[in-house]
Amino acid sequence: MSSPARTALVAGVIVSASALLLAGCSGTSDTSSASKDSINYALPANFTPNWILPIGTAAHLNTNNNSIAASLWEPLIAYDGSTGKIAWNKKASIATAADFAADGKSVTITLGDRSWSDGKPITARDVEFWFNVIKANKAEWAGYNPGKAPDNWTAFKTVDDRHFTITFDQAYNSQWMLANELSQITPLPQHAWDKTGASAAVSDADRTAAGAKQVWTYLNTAAKNISGYDSDALWKTISGPYSIKSFATSGKVVLAANTKYDGGEKANIATVNLLPFTTADAEKNALRSGSVDYGYIEATDLDQKDSFTNRGYAVQPWSGWAITYLPYNFNNPTMGAVFKQLYARQAVQKSIDQAGLAKVIFNGTAVPGYGPIPQAQSSDFLSATQKSNPYPFSTEEAKSLLTGHGWTEQGGVMVCTDAGTGAAQCGEGVAKGTKFEMQVLSQSGSTVTDNMMSAIQSSLAKTGIKFSIKTAPVNSVLAQTPQCTASQAICKWQLSFFGTAGSWYFNAFPTGDSLFQTKGGSNFGNYSNPDVDKLITASTTSTSNQAIQDYSSALAKDLPVVWLPEPVYQISVVKNGLGGFSQDSLANFHPAQWKWTS
């Protein structure tokens, strides 16, 4: 899962993107590149693209969706790691400048002299259209976090066709505002999309809340019709370097170079075939047959590296600016009360042998992660507390935490035998007789993930915690484990895992407003801590790194999720001669940057 990607970090911190040449995941196809005018890119196993609209909703937070949409409609401000560091990539952006007021309470954006594919100019009205639609439908937008954009944008003022000003409700850290908030804006073709229905005429419907809601419904309804992506005229008005040639419900997507593109990142390759795979093994077979130009292997396959290099591929790990975790569902009617007990979460965390998992399961390509800040790459955001691991692995100590709080092991499973709210009792809401049994819905299609879940299951069993595992494709995991209230039928999920290649890829500034702020748009488990909310807010307004380090320390100790090792995004296998780019550590792919160099 990911959020939008961007540029240089706060307080001058730069995050290095991992080395050259890597790639996608698994599928089945015998298509091979017929010439240097095309490329076959393997999508991650079971990571089927299923959304084209450049406005994400909770069920469509698939990194591949983001990358495809950005190739069709360029972001206002594109942050990525394609140059070897996370930075504002102005070549792939509609905006050319962002000038913040001296008091930090507003910004004036300058747009490039750009046109839509139908020849109409891209103007401030297209940005206002996005602004109005999002403002009226914020609760359904996956990028929404209460109090953040668009809540903290109090006014949008058009200066002229190529300049506009957004006013904030207070002064903000300009790096955070640029990298995490303004980067979420994608100018949309108001002259083609501002309609309340397929048969309605284009108007200024977005300028009323009621009209903007109708526009949202129209666009989202059209976006659900995957089989119509290549034929619906709605998706033909684009600003990016590629257009949709075909988009199959099975997940295969063919991109064609946009001949009308007038931006700075013109496509080098005419046709890009994005190939779906149901398993990593199927994708590896495609690599071995030579029908994939840009693919991946799993960490467990590194001992077979020579078999790929001998076939004319380069093999390289692709490190990500990410964290990996298992969200608890704090509102689960059966186990939610247990999950709300810090001692219980500490017992779970101390039962996870991260160093062992990183070494054995990931073949040394992962690093332990102990909190909300990425640890695979150095930065000034990481606190000493998180870095030092506040809950080192010990199933013996984990078991003592439970027995010291009213739990007794019976038949290999801990059972609450002393209910109550006393210091040595099970805790508020935990009924006598409750068994410490929990189930995870985990992403399918990866041997590494399956092996990790089995290892965690064995480790938790030593503590007396029963851990059962169900699997499903990642899109299904996301759909089945949403934010919910205890009374909803969908709230029966307890833990979920969608992090085979990392659970969450950050914007340049790794704030937690989406993930861990109360009612955050991607706070799947409904974690809520008022003190943490204050720390997150401070990190977005302060110009000091101390604020985000305090946030790092607090969540390393409070355990809103089960922290897990951070894997590399992929171990890429890329055909020799394909290059001219660095891998984006924000996990997006950028087909316009790819080119055959030999």
Image: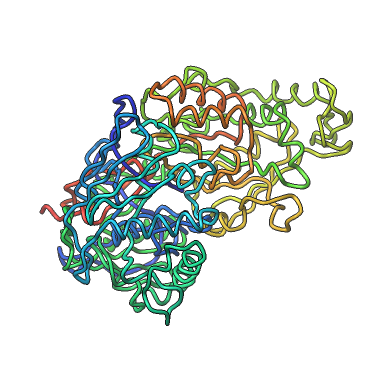
Residue 326 in picture, x, y percent from top left: 58, 41
- Relative to residue 551, is residue 521 depicted above or below? below
Can residue 319 be seen in this snapshot? no
Q: Nearer the viewer, residue 278 or 342?
A: 342
Q: Is residue 140 above or below residue 494?
A: below
Point out residue 350 in the picture as x, y percentages from the top left corner.
63, 26
State left or right for residue 415 relative to residue 119.
right
Q: Nearer the viewer, residue 109 or 489?
A: 109
Query: Residue 85 lies in what quarter of the image?
Result: top left
The residue at the point 51 percent across, 26 percent down is: 551
Residue at 45 percent across and 45 percent down: it is 149
Residue 70 lies, in percent from the top left, at 32, 56
Q: How is the image coloured?
A: rainbow
| Residue at the left extreme, as displayed | 598
Q: Is 95 situated above or below 404? A: below
Name which quarter of the figure residue 353 lies in: top right
Q: Which residue extends farthest bottom? A: 199
The answer to whether residue 433 shows anywhere in this view is yes
Left or right: 592 in relation to 392: left
Q: How many marks?
A: 0
**Residue 357 percent location from the top left of the image:** 52, 33
Between 167 and 257, the residue placed more toward the observer is 167
Residue 269 vertical position relative to residue 573 in the rendered view, above or below: below
Name the side, left or right, on which 243 lies relative to 216. left
Q: Residue at x 85, y 22 (%)?
A: 422
Q: Residue, x 56% and y 26% (percent of image)? A: 556
Q: Which quadrant would the C terminus be assigned to in this image?
A: bottom left
